[in-house]
Each structure stands twice: as structure tokens, then as C-alpha cells.
Image (cartoon, rainbow, N blue to C red):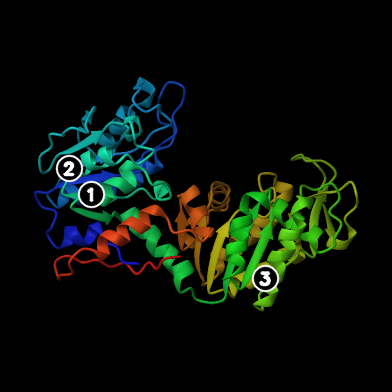
Amino acid sequence: MNFIRFSDLCASGQVAGKRVFIRADLNVPQDASGAITEDTRIRASGPCLQMALDAGAAVMVTSHLGRPTEGEFRPADSLAPVAKRLGELMQREIPVVANWTDGVQVEPGQLVMLENCRLNKGEKKNNEALARKMAALCDIFVHDAFGTAHRAEASTYGIAQYAPVACAGPLLAAEMDAISAAFAQPKRPLVAIVAGSKVSTKLTILKALAENVDQLIVGGGIANTFMLAAGLNIGKSLAEPDLLADATAVIAAMKARGAEVPIPTDVVCAKSFAANAPATVKSAGEVEDDDLILDIGPDTTARLAAQLKSAGTIVWNGPVGVFEFDAFAKGTEGIARAIAESSAFSIAGGGDTLAAIAKYGIEQDVGYISTGGGAFLEVLEGKTLPAFEILQKRADSRPASPASPAHGAVPVL
């Protein structure tokens, strides 16, 4: 799938003097007083904004923040704290513009923050009139918010339909490149790790991956359900017996392709779910009726680590045990260390996964860390994200010329 890169437009001089509308993801956590408690997303959005300013553009940026009611402004919904923090980081004053859909005054070299886009009536339902108003504000629309790429809203999809030019900012382009590397033409073997408490929440992901990956490692409560499907006793461990047929179908689909769902051969058990509960390593066939399986065992960890170290591509979503409890964290740590040591291209996503990466300090050793949340999960499900779809359409419909690059090599998933 082709897409236009904002960086290419800047490099080729097509941005100077133009009005640039950037859809960023500035949805940061705040405390009860409205103070920002974590500013990673603000920091991550800075380079795109600076790129536009350096290229001589008149820059508008907006984002959603929280869950406001459309058409009903409350002070708590305002992007003012975000603009203040962004201004501190960029060392400039960033005014916040309210009621901006009918027009914005901004000159080349200036940057303004457009108030919370989800306050606009029709935003979530991608109202055409609203989208056209947004598009009329700019010469170039830049989508740089992967976390919203799975939503077809007015400020993410509609504006991209009607703006004179629609392109991907550096954050979104990096996600698209990483997804291409992991799923389009991956280096084999392709190993996916899918872990979590319930099969039901990731069943579509498991089924989609079963058609493509060479090894599908399952962990957490999901692994318990697969162990049950393999005829093993899991005691009183978290599982979904009503989904045994689905787990069996995934195993069969993998086997039919000569692929594998490795079933744990040993596990770490406890009699209660507590950080101080005594941990006991047991063979998978020795689990007792009152046992809780809270981690994979050392033999299983070593076997999976060896597979990961010889992989060509790794996709990771979810810790394989209760890694928050040190006694049941060795499996997740072993998986994390193996990914870090592997020469494979690795892409990881999901809140618990990011927490595990941070806990073991392997940020620099993972090929790409996706912060997209729901968007990343939809990619794993094999869905084509609305943002990818519309940017492809706009790139494909743009007349090709040396001065108007439209590329990116991100195939439809």
C-alpha cells in the first residue's frame, strides 16, 4: 500500500508557506487537578510539529483528550494543559484556539493548538460537513496518531478524504513500516506471542495469526485453555472451557500448515493468587486440582527462548505469566530476554507488554514498540485500519511526479 510521507513533502520543499493540519495523539493522563502525570505522547508528537515549522508551514495541531460530550465544553476537557507542556518542551508559546472549525488565523512559522477535537458535534460519526470544514482549513493534512488509526472519525478519516493532500506523519509512518516488516513479507520463521487472561478477548487474533505464523506461543489464561484442550489438568486455573473447540481448531489449523502451538511442558503453580504465595514448579502432567497455574516453567521457558532466538520475525502481545508477582515473573522475563537477544525483527504492543518491556529494560532491543493499543490489536486481527485505507486511496489518486512522492511499501494486511 502506498502512502505519502510528510517528511518527503518537507524535504522536497512542498510545505513552505502551506497551512498544515496535524492530527496528533496528545491524550495524556491527568490527575484530579488536571496536571499531566505522564507526557510521553506529547514528547513523541514534537518532532512532527518541529518538522512542519522548520519547513516553513503555518501549523495547526489537534487531538482528543479524555471522553468529552460533543458540543458540551468543560474546563476538564481542554487541551490547555497539553499546550502548556508542549510549549515548555518546544520553548515557544502555543495558543489554544476554541470554536475553530469555521476558520483559524495562523501564519507560516506559527503553531496553534486547536481545542479538543472530540468536542465538535459529528466527530465520532465522521460527519461529512464537519470533515469538509476541517479539510478547508488546510493545504496538507498530516495523520500522526496511530492510536486513532482504527477509528474512522472526522479528524482522522473524513479530513483525509477532502484535504488537498493527506499524508502520514513520522510516528504513523514508522508504525506502517513496522507492520509491513512484521506481516507483509516477514523474514521466516515468523513467531507470534499472544498472551492474556482470556481466549475470548483475543480469539479473532489467534485465528488470524494461525493462518500466517510459523509458531504461535500462547501464555497466561489463554495457555491454560490450550492446555485443557490438549487434555491436561489445569486445576483451578483461569480458563474458558466453553472455548475448547476454538482452541482445538487453532491448534489444528497450525498443524495443517506444518506450524505449531507449543503447549507448556512445565508450569509454576500456587495454591492462591497472591504475591507471597509459595511457587512450585511442576510438570504439566502433575498439576493438582487445587493448583493455580501462574507462569510457564523453566523448561518451557528455555524451549520457547530457543525458538525466539532462531526466529526471523517476532510479534509480541502479552506477558506469559503474572509478571507483576516476582515469583511468577521468570517466564515473562525469559521471553523478554530472548526477544532482546534475538537477531529477529521484533514488534511489540499492548499495555501489559509495554510494562514488561520497561520492567526488564529492553526498550532498545525491541525492533519496534507500538503504542497504538486498540489499533495494534486490530492489526493482529488482520484488519485494514481506516487510516491506512484512506491514506492509500489519497496516495493512489495523486498524480505521480518527482516532486510528489507517494510510497511506503505497506501492503494491505
**Whole-percent x, y for residue 135 in the image:** 21, 44
Q: Residue flagged by tag 3: what amino acid is it?
A: Ala
The numbered disc on residue 162 is 1
Find the distance from the CA under tag 2 to the CA under tag 3.
Answer: 49 Å
Q: Earlier in the sequence, mark 1 or mark 2?
A: 2
Among the 4 quarters of the image, the one containing residue 268: bottom right
CB-based contact (under 8 Å), mark 1 and mark 2: yes
Q: Is residue 286 left or right of residue 66?
A: right
**Whole-percent x, y for residue 399 in the image:** 17, 66
Q: Residue furthest bottom?
A: 258
Local crowd at mark 1 within 10 Å, few (<14), some, or many (≥20)?
Answer: some
The numbered disc on residue 136 is 2
Query: Looking at the image, which is closer to me, 317 or 128?
Result: 128
Q: Nearer the viewer, mark 1 or mark 3?
A: 1
CB-based contact (under 8 Å), mark 1 and mark 3: no
Residue indicated by mark 3: 253
Label 2 secondary element: helix
Residue 302 is at least partly visible in this image = no
Local crowd at mark 2 within 10 Å, few (<14), some, or many (≥20)?
Answer: some
Q: Residue flagged by tag 2: what amino acid is it?
A: Ala
Q: Is residue 316 left or right of residue 228?
A: left
Residue 199 is at least partly visible in this image = yes
